[in-house]
Amino acid sequence: MDPHERLRELERLGEAYYDAMYDSRYPTGEYADAKDTFSDAIALARQLGETKTIERLEARLAHIKAVFRSQFT
């Protein structure tokens, strides 16, 4: 898979895990998967030198963490 395609797939998958948190009885697993997937996407974006993508993904991950902490803990 092309690295840029992989980056898009990781972001899509991270968003799917985030959405699944709301449907889960125990959202901790989906939260962990979302964090891991976004972290992988950020690492790949760093390898690709995509500064704006890194910033966007880091902001999204921070948002997901804040939502989890405020709504699920």
Image (cartoon, helix red, strand yellow):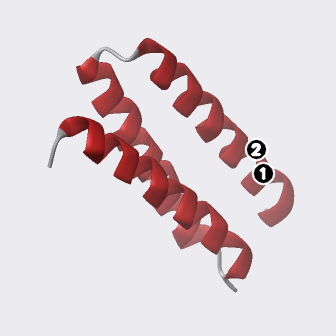
Q: Quadrant of residue 7?
A: top left
* Tag 2 residue: 66
Q: Residues within 10 Å of mark 1 (few under 14, many from 20)?
A: few
From this viewpoint, which residue is outermost toward the left?
1
Q: Quadrant of residue 49?
A: top left
Q: Is residue 63 left or right of residue 8?
A: right
Residue type of the residue flagged with mark 2:
Ala
Relative height, residue 19 to residue 3 (above, below): below
Relative height, residue 40 to residue 27 (above, below): above
Q: Is residue 66 left or right of residue 48?
A: right
Residue at x 78% of width, y 65% of height = 72
User: CB under 8 Å between callouts 2 and 1?
Assistant: yes
The x and y percentages for residue 14 are: 49, 55
The x and y percentages for residue 24 are: 66, 82
Question: If the image is split into quadrants, where does the C terminus sit?
Answer: bottom right
The x and y percentages for residue 42 are: 40, 32
* Tag 1 residue: 67
Residue 48's disc number: none
Q: Is residue 43 left or right of residue 62?
A: left
Q: Residues within 10 Å of mark 2 (few under 14, many from 20)?
A: few
Relative height, residue 23 to residue 4 (above, below): below
Residue type of the residue flagged with mark 1:
Val
Residue at x 37% of width, y 17% of height = 50
The x and y percentages for residue 61 are: 59, 40
> Separation of disc 2 and disc 1 at Cα?
4 Å
Residue at x 53% of width, y 33% of height = 57
Residue at x 55% of width, y 69% of height = 30
